[in-house]
Image (tube, helix red, strand yellow):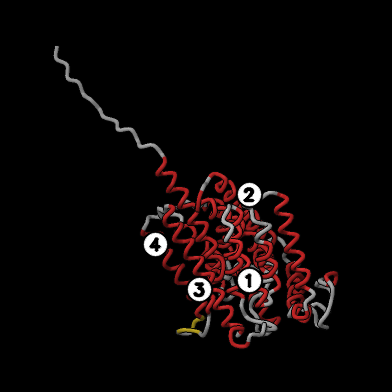
Amino acid sequence: MIACIGGESFLGYNISGYAWAVPAFVSVVVFFSRRGRINLPFKIWIPWIIVVAGYLLFADAENAFQRSVMLLCPLFIGMTVSGFSLGEGELSNFRRLYHYMTISLYIIALLKTGLLVTGVLPEASNLSAPVMTGALLCTLFATNYMLGQKSALVWWGTLVGIPVIALTRMGVIATALSLPLTVAPMKILKRVFLAAIIIAVGYGLFYSARVQKHMFYSGSGTLQEVQLQNPNLSTSGRSNIWEYMQQEIDKQPLFGHGANASEPFVSRLTGGLTHPHNDWLRLLFDYGYFGAVIFGITMALQVLHLIRKGTQASGETRILFFAAASSFISFTLFMFTDNIILYAAFFGNFQFTILGLAYAAKATKGMESSPAEPVRRTVRLKIRW
């Protein structure tokens, strides 16, 4: 929530920076105080850890260490959380917390856009943090709904309103699709029906005057015109950045230019921006196809593992497993137009907290249900002849 509130810097550093650095530090302390007990399948992530650490050893770019730590921070937090003993009671408390967080998030969005004061929807807003965090919360409520909690649909619909208010295009897509694309069990007809409703509402929203003005420089356009090559499409200069980045990627496609090499490149290109707003291009630029493919495969394996564990779980634990798996869909979508891979405070830390809670609860339940070890006693017989 501190990350979503944002604000001015404190002691020379951005407040959002503290929102990921402090949890990272605390997780390190807790992790080693508990002697590194891990239930999250970190072995899946070892190839990615090796890539990030290996590239860091030979990094020349400024801020390479910080960016590398930010890439791995969510994973370490998830590992730490997974080491706790958690029952259904603790998971119910977590459910209450993310309901409170949803209310707080909406209040923050209304205040930061000025909607509460003016009553007018803004033409644009800087709500990246609330939109991303809201998309993650959407996966929780979508999963709750699919697993029988009807009221969760109202909470989900409320959160979809945040990117609409903020007019964040990928935010609208990611949050809206979190319902029909959830990996939680759902009948095909129901999935198709929900997708059809969302597409119909999205179609009407696209042709609204507010969205048209935001999407096209001329103030109007069609769905067929939503192409990067279209000069009328408003991309805030991102398409030009991506084009120049792709040219550099083609020069060293296999192994890339090195850890965080994309940041000084974008800075020189734009004279101010430091991130490309496309994490897939960032990975290709820094780590090449070698690193990007490893990251993609690692994510896929993690999702499959979560789904398998979710089918074996029940109650709140089942919800968390399926929600965690579904969260990677939103994460992947945001990677195409934003810097979510580095926004640990907005998405990653919370996402891997959900993973950690699910694995911790599953392990705790397994220990409680396992039969007790039989007591073995050695009896010595002394025989006298």
Residue underneath mark 1 = 339
Q: Is residue 268 above or below residue 306?
A: below
Marks 4 & 1, CB-CB < 8 Å contact? no
Dot 1 or dot 3: first in sequence order is 3
Q: Mark 4 to mark 1: distance in Å?
A: 28 Å
* Numbered badge on residue 347: none
At label 2, which amino acid type do we have? Answer: Pro
Circle nearer the N terminus (4, 1): 4
- Residue at the image position 78 percent from the left and 69 percent from the top: 203
Please tell me which of labels 4 and 3 falls first in the chain: 3
Q: N-terminal of the two: label 2 or label 1?
A: 2
The residue sitting at 63% across, 49% down in the picture is 185
Q: CA distance from mark 4 to mark 2?
A: 35 Å
Residue 362's x, y, as percent?
47, 48
Counting residues from the N terminus, which is met first, the one under dot 4 or under dot 2? 4
For mark 2, what is the residue?
Answer: 185
Q: Which mark is residue 1?
A: 3
Q: Amino acid at mark 1?
A: Asn
Choose top left, top right, bottom left or bottom right for residue 90.
bottom left
Residue type, numbered disc 4: Val
Residue at disc 4, secondary structure: helix
The reply to whether dot 4 and dot 3 touch (C-beta < 8 Å) is no
In the image, is residue 338 above or below residue 355? below
Q: Please, which residue is most extreme toward the left here? A: 384
